[in-house]
Amino acid sequence: MRSTWSFYTAGQLTFGPGAVRQLGEMVSRRRLSRVFVVTDKTLVQLGIATRVIEPLRSAGITMEVFDGGEAEPSISIALAAIEQARGFQPDAILGLGGGSNMDLSKITATVLGHGGSPQDYFGFDRVPGPVMPLICVPTTAGTGSEVSHAAVLTDTENEIKVSTLSNWLRPTLAVVDPELTYSCPKQVAADSGIDALTHAIEGYTATDYRELATPPGEACAYEGSFSLGDVIAEKAIRLVGENLVRAVNEAKNHEARDNMALASTLAGIAFSNCGVALVHALEYPMGGALHCSHGAGNGLLLPFVMRFNLPERKEKFAKIAELLGVKGSPDIDTMAELAIESIEQLKRDIGIPERIRDIGGTEAHLPTFAEKAFAIKRLLWVNPREASLDDLHGILKSAL
Ligand SMILES: NC(=O)c1ccc[n+]([C@@H]2O[C@H](COP(=O)([O-])OP(=O)(O)OC[C@H]3O[C@@H](n4cnc5c(N)ncnc54)[C@H](O)[C@@H]3O)[C@@H](O)[C@H]2O)c1
Ligand SMILES: [Zn+2]
């Protein structure tokens, strides 16, 4: 049992349209002069990399670009980024892209700072100290990786996502320029947007920090829910409710995209302090095996996990309904149920797969998904309702 909570985020967070134009000055002020940029070919082709590189070049900073990032990157891609970075000998790493590239940049900064290989740091709190100075610039809205303590890779051999979690992975500098998300195709906007909603909801409804009990000798990667996290998560959920459908279906609606960029960063701050839980636990093996995007997998599972958690979180679910714009009913039970239904509707409005069979899953997959999810204890600890292996199997069956 705990009597305190702590709060962490990026060292500096700068938000707003055009923010990347300040990058040269921000980096020079930190006396950094050799920046290794981790990105992907799509972002280079779209000219987004240039929008980040130009201000740095004008400030006299030397750069090298790794453009080998891929969605849901594997360990071998991380090794390639690390090898190229070692050759360049940077004094800072800049991750430009969605969660995939930002997470690659975090692993690169870790291994360049401490040696070894990515696998040495998987799990919670295995990074021994500060990593190489890390700058993250998101281009999706989004994972919140620019403020979070997580980096996720795909272990292709074991068909599962693997996380490195450490407060040393919070970037020194996070620059969130919503203009960089304007070119996101509809599906990327939908998948990453519902990931942000999942982060906010899982953080908001996580086990209360005072009740978060971990086995002796085991540290938890999250604090559980607490006041400051609640305030931030509520704002994120409201922004998603007001903006996600328009941001996805009206690509030129810059106001909606700007607001989603803010929502995803706020959701990242909330979840990376309070926690993510069963949705993420079940998505890691499911996404690893069925190769759906992280956001689509989370969005698919979210209402099913909420239905399981409902008895433990009626009041907060009722508040979520209100934040998502559901017109009020005085009855908490009704409102809590409406929260789930409004998310089911949201999924349909933006084109998130409804069921596991829609992404190629079968009954035969479910026992393995349940077992692998059940092993990710840090995510189960913060789930508001205790879940047995059978419960996990039951949730997956309901989602099949
Ligand atoms: N570190 C964390 O805290 C955290 C949190 C959640 C998810 N994740 C991880 O992040 C990854 C998912 O990240 P994501 O949802 O941001 O997507 P992503 O980074 O995988 O990108 C998806 C695709 O969109 C393209 N893209 C990105 N920005 C674009 C833009 N502005 N215009 C056009 N195309 C663009 C990319 O090139 C890529 O092909 C997963 O690996 C997931 O596990 C990490
Ligand atoms: Zn996520």
Image (cartoon, rainbow, N blue to C red):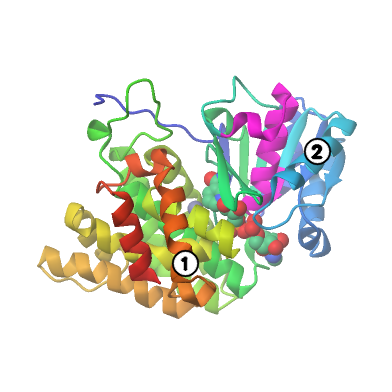
Residue range corresponding to the magenta coloring: 95-122
Residue 221 in sight here: yes
Q: Judge whether residue 103 is colored magenta.
A: yes
Provide residue 218's location: percent of width, then percent of height: 39, 25
Lateral position of residue 93 relative to residue 152, left or right: right
> Against 190, is 157 above or below?
above
Q: Which label was assigned to residue 364?
A: 1
Considering every residue shown, the one lying at the far left of the view is: 331
Provide residue 386's location: percent of width, then percent of height: 25, 46
Is label 1 in a helix, a strand or a loop? helix
Camera-side residue of 210 and 170: 210
Comes first in the chain, label 1 or label 2: 2
* Residue at 33% over, 69% down: 398
The amino acid type, in three-letter code, at marker 2 is: Phe
Which SS type dominates the magenta stretch?
helix
* Residue at 49% over, 63% down: 297
Q: Does the residue labelled 1 lie within 8 Å of ligand 1?
A: no
Q: Which label was assigned to residue 36?
A: 2
